[in-house]
Image: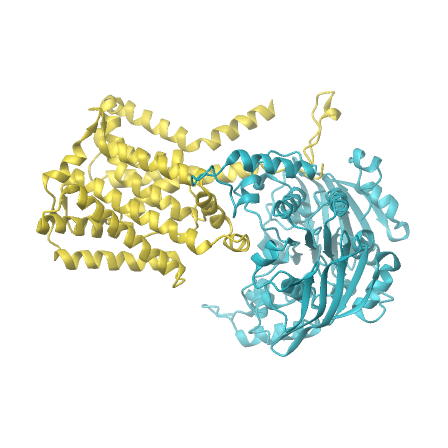
Amino acid sequence: MLENILQFDGISKSFFGVRALEDVSFSLPGSHLLGLIGENGAGKTTLMNILGGVLAPDSGRMRLRTADYAPRRPADATGAGIAFIHQEWNLFTNLSIADNLFINRFPRLGRSPFINRTVTRKQTAKLLESLNLTLSPETLVDRLTPGERQLVEIAKALSTGAEIIIFDEPTTSLTAAETQRLFDIIGGLREQGKSMIYISHNLGNVLELADDIVVLRDGRVVDTGPGRDFTIDRMISRMVGRAIDQIFPTRESRPSQEIVLEVKGLSQTGIVKDINLVLHKAEVLGLFGLMGSGRTELARMLFGLEPFERGEILANGVLCSRICAGDCIRRGMAFVTENRREEGLLMEATVVDNVGLAALPAFASTRFPRLLRHRQLSEAVTRIAESMRIKSGPVARTLAKNLSGGNQQKVVIGKWLMSRPAIFIMDEPTRGIDVGAKHEVYSIINDLAAQGAGILLISSELEELMGLCDRILVMSKGEITGGFNRAEFAQEPILHAAFKGHQRLSQNGRAGQR
Amino acid sequence: MRKTRDTMLVMALRHTPLILFVVIFLLFGCLSPRFLSYQSFENIVKQASYIGIAAVGMTFVLLTAGIDLSIGSNMYLSAVIAGLLIQNHNLPASLALVVCLAVGLLFGTVNALAVTRLKLIPFVATLGTLWIGRGVGLWLTKSVPVEFPQSVTQIGSQKLFDEVPLPVVVFALVVLCASVLLRWTALGRQIYAVGNDLEAAKKAGINTARVRGTAFIICGLLAALGGFISVSQLGIVNAGFGKDREFDAIAAAVLGGTSLFGGIGSVFPGTVLGAILIQMVTIGLVSAQVDLYLQPLVAAGIIFVAVLLDSLRTRQLAKLSRRHIRVEELTSPRAGGIVPMLGEE
């Protein structure tokens, strides 16, 4: 079985004279899972686009089994049995699962133009069954959870008869239990003889799954070997090219006793119940919980984006009743949203427009037409971009969509720095960005706390919270199920609190892995 | 108990267009008993059929997240050309119908090319053809009304089995074909896919230009057919024929639950109900003897409320079908035994 099913041989690619890939060679043995890791911009996406027929390499070639493989369009890759499962799903939410699976190749009833529903239904049911999904083929995708949608994507890949499946960050929107289920299915696919390439920033997952690991840095393969020979440290040091002995900056400040945000008995039927929390000046307060535990909903309530039935929110000692986001901003709150593409950024707008967005009134002239003073605005934004080390072209002309994930995240945070808020709510600020960018975001959080801001940091990565926070609160099923001071930080009790109420899951003991 | 109440609410909300339809029907019935007769209902459906047919075409375009503002001009131009050919060359009615449909098809094709080849956004492209279409028609007729011979007007008053007016039969056939096309063919499903997410549709290997173009061509064809049905009832086409009808068609589709953002909606019952509802309001106001000059205002009010209710309905539905994070404890002793409706289970 160790015969190579796919081989990259000396692949190089440049964009406008900038090297994206240089002499990349490695191979994927049959029935293997190859972990492909590297920082953002290391060339993973470019390489996969070449594999998928979206881009053509400048030089080098690929071999599929024993034949040369040179796809010219995405359909060639599909035809060759290569399927891609992306971070963002390609599903039509208004159609059924069966329709989604067959959308571009419906079987016909004889020679008529009509769809043979019996066939689509049967084949879909069979595929869903093989993935242990107990859903009717007629279920609308709209009604599925993120985890189920991911599995439907896999079913789609399998339905095209794919032999090689590429996963690109497949777990970013999945809960721990859904992730585990995905991994079980990946294991099953491997047993069936499928070969896979798994790309992720979650190095723990890669380590758990991969038979082989390939590390890319600056467009080159810098390390490769069997997965069991790797450790997280080795992966990081290879990716970054230097050892990050300290991913988390040392906290320089101590939280003061002064309270900036207080929540009392916040409840909303079916969402959260009786939430009490206190955030101090210069404190980093972690909020840990599984996905779907109500963390994001709580954050949105605090920022006036979702209603609540009972309870009080006091910002800087002032009771906020009937709050809206605009009031929150005026009271010195900032909300770094979870989903930067959809909620955090205007992708088609420039860095200046994005960063300036929440502080525009401050840059308007004082008299009536209140026109914007563009020069001051763009100077202020430039200062922020420099202080945050946002790597971009001229801030007044570079569009947000052209920045890397890490730099986009800095823009989202930078947007709030303009108005110097005292309270930050950050929802998954490091999701999907590479190790180097994470480190910079951590430093920014650290600096903000040192300057006296109170920060409520929501994250699914426990290590991150344990490295940064002064205190951690744990949520499960819409309730706060635990609170830990820095001295008490330990994985096990925190995870235990996070799984409270999920008895069935915690009993079989696996769901705790992240 | 709460659960069954919620389910009933969801059911009611899902069928809002139908409920609204019945309520308005009964309301006018109370105001004027004459309105409740079979005769009056037949009349409503007959009068609704020409806008209904055009609205079915509009539904195709709306489903792809497009819009066609030119159908009124299309109706005018295709009827004018057919009428002039009859006048000058003694064309028989059947051939005139073919010519009329051919012009509509061509009109739709121009829209399709403007959107898919010239990459104009549908709003702008069809705003352009709206002016061009009417302009060509006015130039051909010098704004003189075009009269149609009896051979054409006969069609409008014919009845199938001496019972069902021909326009209604044509409307029903169009609705049937459109429903089957949307539900049972690959093209139909791809229309929904394109409207839901154009980028994803491209990535899924769908020829999105073909799908969107086809929707415009179908819309053009049906607009011409609707126009011809109207002509067969009126017998004359003057310079204002078809003007603003695009808005009736859009209103009918939207009243029937079609989303202007694409991907959501149906021909039956959706658009059919919408088209009949609009006509019902118009005729109902006449038979209730509402002041002639007040009628447009009242009709606009009723339609606005209907659309408002529909949008409230969509929001409420989304809220009700949202997954809950936690299950609130019930007071019953067996509360612990309830299986939570959790995403990650």
Residue located farthest toward the front when viewing the structure as drawn: A66
Coloured how?
by chain
* Image height of B111 relative to A310, above or below: below
Q: Is residue B282 visible?
A: no
**Which x, y percent locates residue A53?**
60, 62
User: Residue visible at 13% across and 46% down?
Assistant: B91
Q: Is residue B230 visible?
A: yes
User: Residue visible at 60% across and 38% down?
Assistant: A124
The mark total stands at 0
Nearer to me, A396 or A221: A221
Residue B263 appears left or right of A425? left
**Which x, y percent locates residue B101?**
25, 47
User: Residue visible at 41% across and 37% down?
Assistant: B180
Residue B231 appears left or right of A83? left
Residue located farthest toward the bottom when viewing the structure as drawn: A17
* Image height of B144 relative to B40, above or below: below
Residue B317 appears left or right of B62? right
Chain letter for the yellow part: B
- Quadrant of the rendered structure where residue A181 is? top right
Residue A154 appears left or right of A224? left
* Image height of A168 relative to A93, above or below: below
- Quadrant of the rendered structure where residue B23 is? top left
* Image height of A346 relative to B40, above or below: below
**Which x, y percent locates residue B189?**
47, 43
- Quadrant of the rendered structure where residue B134 is? bottom left
Chain letter for the cyan part: A
**Which x, y percent locates residue B307?**
40, 40
